Amino acid sequence: MKRIVLEDKTVFEGKIFKVHQQKIKREDGAIYHRDIVKKNGAVAVLPITENNEIVLVSEFRDALGKEVLTVPAGLLDKENEDIKDAAKRELKEETGIHEVYSLDYVGEIYSSEGFTNESTYCFLAKVNAASRKEVSLDENEQIDPNKMQFIPFEKALQMVDQNEFKSKATNYLLLIADRMNRKK
């Protein structure tokens, strides 16, 4: 469906996103308004150890008011940041894992396509769990390194089936990794 943006004004500009109010005309002539959140995007990484365990972090999310068990993930620091570099950075910062055998891009998912342009770029990583050192979190991250979990891959898939992960990126990456394993 063709549409024309008649007006687009920034009504809020925060540290990590902007809110735009748009006036839009559809091809049938109808006019409507949208509030759109614009962000640089994010990366998410599913680390898989040599013992076929996945590595998850427990991060307190202020918007939810609780901890969420999730894959290491984070925002792109700047608009044109290389997504693979960002994925390596987030993996190292949040897990302390320094040795990565492979880091493969597997897809892009929309965070919430109804109101934001944010995409999350997803990676699978084969890692050496023994290379784990101290985490180096950003000042706003609330990850407890003592709550990091190493979960056998098959158990993690069962947890997906039981809706234990609420993170879209975590579920997506586990299902993609499972599909890729089945193709081998």
Image (cartoon, helix red, strand yellow):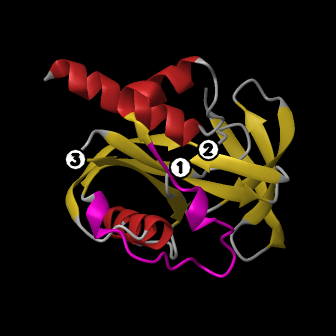
Label count reads 3
Query: 62 or 51: which is nearer to us?
Result: 51
- Asked which secondary structure carries label 2, the reply is loop
Magenta part of the chain = 129-150
Horizontal placement of 107 versus 120: left or right?
left
Picture disc at residue 119: 1
- The structure residue drawn at horizontal position 77% and vertical position 43%, both measured from the top left corner, is 24
Q: Is residue 146 above or below residue 122?
A: below
Q: Position of residue 1 (x, y in %)?
A: 61, 26
Magenta stretch, main secondary structure, is: loop
Residue at disc 3, secondary structure: loop
Three-letter code, disc 1: Ser
Identify which amino acid the numbered label 3 is placed on: Glu
**Where's the C terminus, which quadrant?**
top left
Which residue extends farthest left? 184
Dot placed on the residue nearer the N-terminal end, 1 or 3 = 3
Q: Nearer the viewer, residue 108 or 11?
A: 108
- Residue at image mark 2: 111
Going 54% across and 63% down the picture, which residue do you hit? 74
Q: From the viewer's side, name the closer residue of 166 and 149.
A: 149
Q: Which residue is mark 3?
A: 50
Query: In the image, residue 32 lies at what x, y percent?
Result: 86, 37
Calculate the distance from the C-alpha at mark 1 to the C-alpha at mark 2.
6 Å
**How far apart, in angstroms, are the residues tagged by discs 2 and 3?**
30 Å
Tell me whether the residue at label 1 lies in contact with that at label 2, contact meaning CB atoms closer than 8 angstroms.
yes
Q: Residue at x 59, y 52 (%)?
A: 118
**First in sequence: mark 2 or mark 3?**
3
Q: Give the amino acid at mark 2.
A: Ser
The tag on residue 178 is none
